Amino acid sequence: MSPEEILKTGEIDPDFLEAFHPLVQKLNIPKPQWNSVAESRELFRKRQALGLEAMGPTPSDMIEEDQHIPVKDGSKIRIRVIKHKNASGRPLVVLFHGGGFVSGSLEGEQANARSLVRAFDAVCVSVGYRLAPEHKFPTAIDDAWDALRWTAENATALGADPSEGFIVGGSSAGGNIAAVLAHLARDENLTPPLTGQGLCIPAVLNDVAAAKVLPEKYKKLYLSYEQNSDPPGLGKVGIDFFMEQYAPDADDPKYNPFLWPGGHKGQPPAYFQVCGADPLRDEALLYELVMREEAGIPTKLDIYPGLPHGFWAVFPMFPAAKKVAADLVKGYSWLLGIEPAKVETEQVTMAV
């Protein structure tokens, strides 16, 4: 895409703007101030509560079971296994929620997990990694890596067969985690190996690092932090607030996987979902470009022009939100090489 084409995707959808303010008022969702961890978490809690209510109880043909698993510092974290009853030998999907590494919970991926269980009879594991500022970088990555390894080791007991497909995925901060884990899995020879990665509105190269490391041919395509600095929802102020709490090292590839010292070759295929009016847009687009053209990794990309970061979390009734849900199933179908039993277009997608 040319710089002009990229900028065009950032022009806010007028239909979205027309619906945005009345719906926020109706649902009593306050405008984020991005100056308080407690307020940020409460905002996510309210959004998540609305989604959980709309989603309803566990379907009668599924099991949704929480477990607590050990991580390397001796602590335990919560995971949720979502699968059909009597699942056996099914594809395995491990999901990580968004929330800027500060907010959110594993329930944030529950709707996506149900959709993937319905479509592919998959066994899904949603991971509740520990949050900043109580647990700063790289705790979230360490927890996630331990959870991924635990899941691989216990796949059979969970009713999964990773040879049928083993995907790591996530949204926003969870997309960052998934991208990092794909590199770690390659470098550490995770067994069984990953077969795919689902990167939804991922953070993979922040603006500080981009200014230092991007070659000129890519700098001209890195426009979204400026263009989308203050859109509806998450803007640069919000991103900066979350990163103050998470406190990563901008030069550490476990925060900016775009910078991975061993490069990107040898990773599994990647499916991307990217919002046009998102500050994170161009790091995702560049990451997809580099993976595809320089590392030879098969990729699939869906872009949602004119729409802000994770818009579906507040507006699941907006027509494009249904497309995001349907695209997720199609994207994972591509990763798995399996036709879906049902494309779930009425899904209530959770807060990111």
Image: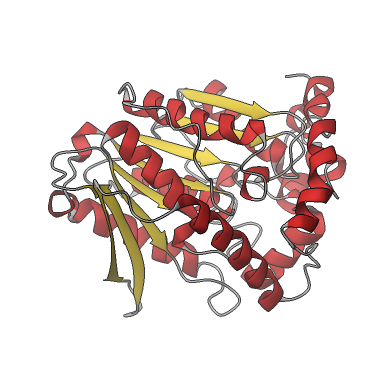
Quarter of the rendering containing residue 251: bottom right
> Quarter of the image holding residue 247?
bottom right
Foreground: 121 or 149? 121
Against 130, is 145 above or below?
above
How many numbered discs?
Answer: 0
Residue name at image x 62 percent, y 65 percent:
46
Residue 267 seen from this side: yes
Residue 299 x/y as whole percent: 49, 25
Residue at 19 percent across and 44 percent down: it is 160
Q: Nearer the viewer, residue 56 or 238?
A: 56
User: What residue is rendered at 62% in x and 69% in y?
Assistant: 246
* Side (left or right) of 50 relative to 282: left
- Residue 286 appears in the figure: no
Residue 323 at what x, y percent from top left? Answer: 58, 29
Residue at x 34% of width, y 25% of height = 340
| Quarter of the image with the N terminus in it | top right
Q: Position of residue 68 (x, y in %)?
A: 29, 71
The type of colouring in the image is secondary structure
State left or right for residue 38 relative to residue 185: right
Q: Nearer the viewer, residue 241 or 188?
A: 241
Taking the image as shown, residue 262 lies to the left or right of residue 245, namely: left
Q: Position of residue 305 (x, y in %)?
A: 73, 28
On the picture, is 62 further left or further right than 305? left
Relative to residue 189, is residue 351 depicted above or below?
below
